[in-house]
Amino acid sequence: MVCGGFACSKNALCALNVVYMLVGLLLIGVAAWGKGLGLVSSIHIIGGVIAVGVFLLLIAVAGLVGAVNHHQVLLFFYMIILGLVFIFQFGISCSCLAINRSKQYMIILGLVFIFQFGISCSCLAINRSKQTDVINASWWVMSNNTRHELERSFDCCGLFNLTTLYQDDPSCNAICKNRSSTCQMCGEKFLKHSDEALKILGGVGLFFSFTEILGVWLAMRFRNQKDPRANPSAFL
């Protein structure tokens, strides 16, 4: 039987939000785990991941409460916010997955979808030249500790044409300096990993973008359905 009834829509919306809650908790847990083991020292990175996890968790809780109680106001704002996230994420994901230069629950949920869809598309669209520009810009806004940590993790010194400068700098503590007189440029290693990372990010972003559209559709459908247990004369 097609899932079109009140109970089926409610259960599907609850299940989707439970998944979002688990993903949010996973992001928070991974960030805390990485910080605890010293895998990531930057408080900005940790804070950003935790913020995303908390935001997703709050949206999922609002959607879950709205679905369980058939709360019209919560479901409305849930659709709006999720839509906005979709718009943003979809744009980024498309940019990440594209190879050339051309360049996301009711209203907000729809806008969320557009936002997320845009991010995913953006990730897919960044070419090697743009990746180089991003790496260059990011390198110089990092703290010295973060740069040294990356040099040690990737076993490299400097960035692109600045390699010689960093090889002569005693602050570069990469292991390669002890093995030979030259070290591979960090920029080249970053570029090798960025292509695969952007495609993964874009693909995952696009997948979650469409789950958000599903969430918006389920929330809109469920919100407009009448609770069979309610007063027959009541509006929805």
Image (spheres, grey):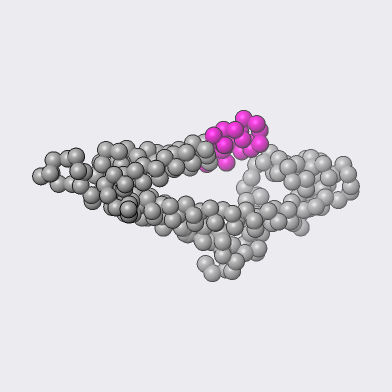
Q: Is residue 128 above or below residue 144?
A: below
* Quadrant assignment, res 32: top right
Horizontally, residue 28 falls left or right of residue 72, namely right
Horizontally, residue 213 falls left or right of residue 66, namely right
Does residue 55 show up?
A: no
Q: What's the magenta region? A: 29-48
Name the residue nearer the viewer: 166 or 200.
200
Total marks shown come to: 0
Name the residue nearer the viewer: 163 or 1.
1
Furthest-top residue in this view? 36
* Image x and y of residue 121, in percent: 51, 61
Q: Is residue 34 magenta?
A: yes
**What residue appears at the point 53 percent right and 53 percent down from the top-left corner?**
204
Name the residue nearer the viewer: 7 or 72.
7
**What residue appears at the point 49 percent right and 36 percent down from the top-left corner?**
25
* Image x and y of residue 198, in percent: 60, 56
**What residue appears at the point 52 percent right and 38 percent down from the top-left corner?**
26
Name the residue nearer the viewer: 73 or 41.
73
Q: Is residue 192 above or below residue 179?
A: below
* Image x and y of residue 165, in percent: 79, 50
* Quadrant assignment, res 10: top left
Does residue 94 show up?
A: yes
Q: Is residue 116 magenta?
A: no
Q: Is residue 41 above or below residue 118?
A: above
**What residue appears at the point 78 percent right and 45 percent down from the top-left corner?**
155
* Quadrant assignment, res 200: bottom right
Furthest-left residue in this view? 233
Furthest-front residue in this view? 1
* Image x and y of residue 144, in percent: 69, 41
Q: Which secondary structure is most common in the magenta stretch?
A: helix
